[in-house]
Image (cartoon, coloured by chain):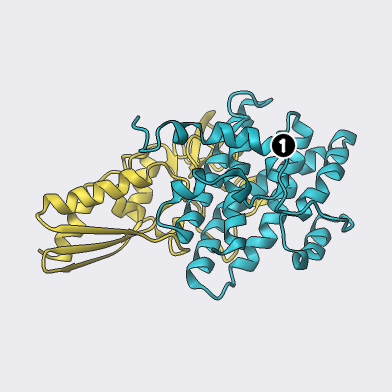
Chain colours: A yellow, B cyan
Amino acid sequence: MTAEQIWAAFEEIPDPEIPVVSLVDLGVIRSVDVSDGHVRVEFTPTFLGCPALEVMKRALEEKVTALGAEPEVQVIADDSWSTDKITAAGREKLRAAGFAPPAPREASAPKLVQLQSAVFRCPYCGSTETRLENIFGPTPCRSLRYCETCRQPFEQFKTI
Amino acid sequence: MNELLLGLADDELIVGWRDSEWTGIAPLLEEDVAFSSIAQNEIGHARAVYQLLTDDADALAFDRPLDEYRCAPLVELRLLDWAHTIARRWLYEEADRVRIEALMSDADPQVAGLAAKIDREEAYHRMHAELWHARLRDEPRFREAVAELWPYALGVVTPEQRAELARRVGLDEVDAVERGTHTDELAELWDEMTMVRRSAPAGAQW
């Protein structure tokens, strides 16, 4: 078994809360090491309080087991994941499903004035005439915005 | 055990618990969503810090007697009006920021890494506090609530960090309500928080 096969298998695991993207699209799998039927996976949470964390960990373990190897999934709670790790393919899948992909993270943490500015693009009509409705949304990773052009509320992936 | 980290984890657990009490009854629907999300993040931070300290985060969170909790009295208070609730959110986030920034340069890379991760999420809690602070800062009820809770907020950070906290919030340093003593409100919260754990010590199945 090769690491490439494991990565390919992980591409089939959907995010439990936004199933249009896979765990590979989300960029939460930091490394895969294969040796003697043993697969070691380093995995980073998106948000620490994400209730899907255990589900994702179990899905990774089950996938490795199904391929006939022994899994060891380690959750790495450090600063290595940011929304900039979401792949280009993942961002496009998010947008197509009505979730505005996260803005790139700048050198410093995002600011309120940025969230309140009209630079975030509506995933439905592409307009940037959008306003912040709520910093928080249905899951920790999303904010709520409203598009003034097509008059649709939409979910904006937070930049972290 | 690292008392500073245990205090941080206990603060996050208890403030998360208190924030979650607004779920369903906040004055605005948006705030139901905000407080629920903030509570979820804070409890997630508590879990991650407990995991640095022990292999069994649930046991550390729920199996201790009351007097072994190291949370600051600020987070224990059961606040029933919005002015106090927002005053605590704002003061807590300011205090937490001073503490988290210090931990981000901790000598232990695991502590520093986790603190930086927490900081990314807290940025959104700060924006929420900033929005409400801008709205309410001239309201007498809010100002009174801030004045009342300020000695408690100073107790969240170490004595060396207090001058910096006072500078950031623009208030004069006063005697702090120190960590180590508990309010009566914590006993009630502990009773509720540990109920499932005590009734099913082997672990509850849902």
Left of A119 or right of it: where is A97?
A: left
Q: Residue B15: x, y in percent? A: 63, 43
Q: What residue sits right under mark 1 in the picture?
A: B184
The subunit letter for the residue under badge 1 reads B
Q: Please report the residue visible at 79 percent of the width from the left and 51 percent of the height from the top.
A: B177
* Viewer-nearest residue: B88 or B76: B76
At horizontal 73% and vertical 33% (from top left) the residue drawn is B79
Q: Quadrant of the C terminus of chain B?
A: top left
Task: Identify whether A37 is placed above or below A64.
Answer: below
Q: Amino acid at mark 1?
A: Asp
Apparent side of residue B22 relative to residue A84 in the rendered image (left or right): right
Front-lying residue, A143 or B12: B12
Q: Quadrant of the N terminus of chain B?
A: bottom right
Residue B136 placed where, x, y %? Answer: 81, 38
Q: Secondary structure at mark 1?
A: helix
Q: Residue at x 55, y 43 (%)?
A: A128
Residue shown at the point (77%, 36%) measured from the top left: B84
Can residue B190 be seen in this snapshot?
yes
**Relative to residue B116, is residue B200 drawn left or right?**
left
